[in-house]
Amino acid sequence: MYHGFIDVPPLSYYEFGNVWTGSLLGDFNYKIEPHSKDEPPVLAAYYWYGEKCFEMSECENFIEGFSEAGYQRIIDKLNEKIKAYRNGLYGLDS
């Protein structure tokens, strides 16, 4: 399901420990994974640039609570990062 620029499954997908990765614009990559054993449980989002895989790249990340609100904040933050990257890549102002 698309949310802004990114395609991500619903929050229930992560309840089973599933991880989601995606990319766009050729070299903007992202990964969302649940950390259900943390107390309280959280969702972690990572993003990186380039053609290398997650394990071979330097990533930025942010963490939100495992809830609908936290899930939406993850989506919003990833969309902000993608928009900024896209604007820089293509010289756009908005």
Image (cartoon, rainbow, N blue to C red):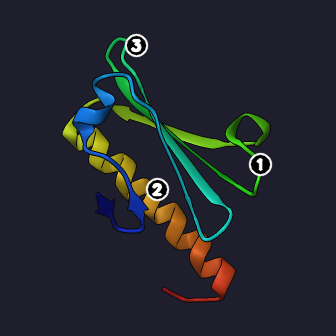
Q: Quadrant of the N terminus?
A: bottom left
- Using the image, determine if residue 9 lies above or below residue 77: above
Q: Please tell me how crowded label 1 is: few (under 14), some (14-19), or many (20+) other residues with Cα within 10 Å.
A: few
The residue wearing badge 3 is: 38
Element type where label 3 sits in the image: loop
Circles 1 and 3, Cβ within 8 Å, touching? The answer is no
Q: Please tell me how crowded label 2 is: few (under 14), some (14-19), or many (20+) other residues with Cα within 10 Å.
A: many
Instruction: Answer with mark 3 or mark 2, whichever residue precedes in sequence.
Output: 3
Q: Which of the two residues, 55 or 91, is positioned nearer the viewer here?
A: 55
Residue 83 picture location, percent across and down: 50, 72
Point out the frontmost of discs 1 and 2: 1
Element type where label 2 sits in the image: helix
Q: Residue drawn 25% across and 38% down?
A: 11
The residue wearing badge 2 is: 78
- Using the image, determine if residue 39 lies above or below residue 3: above
Spatial CA distance of label 1 from label 2 is 19 Å
Figure quadrant of residue 38: top left
Point out the frontmost of discs 1 and 3: 1
Spatial CA distance of label 1 from label 3 is 28 Å
Instruction: Answer with mark 1 or mark 2, whichever residue precedes in sequence.
Output: 1
Going by the numbered disc 2, the residue's amino acid type is Leu
Going by the numbered disc 3, the residue's amino acid type is Asp
Q: Residue drawn 48% across and 85% down?
A: 94
Going by the numbered disc 1, the residue's amino acid type is Lys
Residue 44 picture location, percent across and down: 46, 33
Element type where label 1 sits in the image: loop
Q: Which mark is residue 52?
A: 1
Instruction: Answer with mark 1 or mark 3, whichever residue precedes in sequence.
Output: 3
Q: Please tell me how crowded label 3 is: few (under 14), some (14-19), or many (20+) other residues with Cα within 10 Å.
A: few
Spatial CA distance of label 3 from label 2 is 22 Å
Q: Residue drawn 54% across and 89% down?
A: 93
- Using the image, determine if residue 69 lies above or below residue 22: above
